[in-house]
Image (spheres, coloured by chain):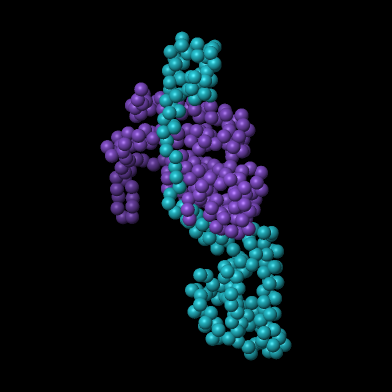
Chain colours: A purple, B cyan
């Protein structure tokens, strides 16, 4: 299949109708049209490209199976984002629950009959092959990932995905004022995190 | 204007000093702390803007469609697996679809029975009728063993479904290309 271009509202409506009637090819065209947006959003929310792909696939599978419930009250892409946002938050919560299990970093790992010492890569000293640009992006990504889930959600949707306040309110099912308030807080917290990284020398910013 | 008020505006404007009102700009000229705050915000905005957009990996769409096909196969009941092509899944509640499929099947059975001289002429002694059905619909009806063999050779795989009834002697075969 060729990569989808931006679809008009009429085309989206036609493809959704066809997909509802069981036309998987039509649904495939919708996937192509929105896959970058949904994948990009999840990659930024979850920080892991493999996990983002897995969750993005799940978004479209759930969307296909729930097409009967899509009535067109919101746009198709905000509906997709809503599914993606809910899944991303679930994954983030599950991660936190798993991270809360305490274990010693000094204790050896067991793999089958063997034991191995844990090695934690030192990401502050990236290999020379990684360009400075990529290092900066990696650090900024860490700062974004460090935001609370609800603030990160709004920041990613507005600043990185380019969605409007109104669409974000629709996606997250919160009032417009809440979107603006969360974005305000997200910007403030991100600024503080990046300032701290500059102060510790993790991040070098040119003048 | 107070520092708090100016900094609130700076956050809303993401450090874009040019968009501040005259009063706020005048405050900035006199307040080094607020100027640093504006600079930090502008830097944060610039760094965020450097994050490259993500693109879905190659083959993503095909993997999604394959996953949908797997999920649908698991969730279909056996009548829907056999005859789901007769009625799109998303139309109406499941029981209507099952009744509709059963009605179509009965018509088919009746038609096949008529080909063999009717229901009263000892169908048990007749060879079973085979109906091949797949994603393209019903494509062949075989009433003799040699026809069945030809049907098997024509299609890549055949899955023998449950007989509709021993008396009717009709077997429904599902095939896939």
Residue at screen point 47% across, 42% down: A40
Residue at screen point 30% across, 50% down: A115
For the C terminus of chain A, which image quadrant?
A: top left
Q: Hey, which quadrant is residue A166 in on the image?
A: top right
In the image, is B27 to the left or to the right of B142? left
- Residue A121 position, x and y percent, is 32, 40
B97 over A193 or under it: above or below: below
Residue at screen point 44% across, 42% down: B54
In the image, is B154 to the left or to the right of A207? right
Q: Hey, which quadrant is residue A22 in on the image?
A: bottom right
Is residue A192 among the parts visible in the rendering?
Answer: no
Is residue B58 among the parts visible in the rendering?
Answer: yes
- Residue A199 position, x and y percent, is 36, 24
Tell which residue pokes out farthest to the top in this image. B30
Residue at screen point 49% across, 25% down: B14
In the image, is B146 to the left or to the right of B168? left
In the image, is A114 to the left or to the right of B103? left
Asked whether A101 or A16 is in front, the reply is A16
A37 over A144 or under it: above or below: below
- Residue B98 position, x and y percent, is 67, 67
- Residue A163 position, x and y percent, is 54, 36
Asked whether A51 or A170 is in front, the reply is A170
């Amino acid at each position: 299949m060729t990569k989808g271009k931006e679809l008009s509202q009429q085309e989206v409506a036609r493809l959704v109708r066809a997909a509802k009637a069981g036309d998987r090819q039509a649904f495939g065209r919708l996937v192509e049209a929105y896959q970058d947006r949904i994948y990009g959003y999840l990659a930024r929310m979850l920080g892991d490209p493999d996990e983002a792909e897995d969750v993005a696939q799940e978004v479209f599978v759930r969307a296909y199976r729930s097409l009967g419930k899509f009535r067109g009250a919101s746009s198709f892409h905000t509906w997709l984002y809503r599914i993606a946002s809910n899944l991303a938050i679930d994954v983030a919560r599950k991660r936190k629950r798993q991270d809360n299990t305490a274990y010693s970093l000094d204790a050896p790992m067991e793999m089958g009959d063997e034991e191995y010492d844990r090695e934690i890569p030192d990401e502050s000293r990236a290999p020379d092959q990684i360009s400075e640009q990529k290092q900066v992006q990696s650090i900024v990504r860490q700062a974004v990932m460090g935001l609370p889930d609800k603030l990160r959600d709004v920041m990613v949707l507005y600043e990185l995905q380019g969605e409007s306040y109104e669409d974000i309110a629709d996606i997250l099912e919160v009032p417009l004022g809440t979107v603006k308030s969360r974005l305000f807080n997200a910007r403030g917290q991100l600024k503080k995190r990046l300032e701290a990284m500059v102060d510790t020398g993790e991040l070098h910013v040119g003048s | 204007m107070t520092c708090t008020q100016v900094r609130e505006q700076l956050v809303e404007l993401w450090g874009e000093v040019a968009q501040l009102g005259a009063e706020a700009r005048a405050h900035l000229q006199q307040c080094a702390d607020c100027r640093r705050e504006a600079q930090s915000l502008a830097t944060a905005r610039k760094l965020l803007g450097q994050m490259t957009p993500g693109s879905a990996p190659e083959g993503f769409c095909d993997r999604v469609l394959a996953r949908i096909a797997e999920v649908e196969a698991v969730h279909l009941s056996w009548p829907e697996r056999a005859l789901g092509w007769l009625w799109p899944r998303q139309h109406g509640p499941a029981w209507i679809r099952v009744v509709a499929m059963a009605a179509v099947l009965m018509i088919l059975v009746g038609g096949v029975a008529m080909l063999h001289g009717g229901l009263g002429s000892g169908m048990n002694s007749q060879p079973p009728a085979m109906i091949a059905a797949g994603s393209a619909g019903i494509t062949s009806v075989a009433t003799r063993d040699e026809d069945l063999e030809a049907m098997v050779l024509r299609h890549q795989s055949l899955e023998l479904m449950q007989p509709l009834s021993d008396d009717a002697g009709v077997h429904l075969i599902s095939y896939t290309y």
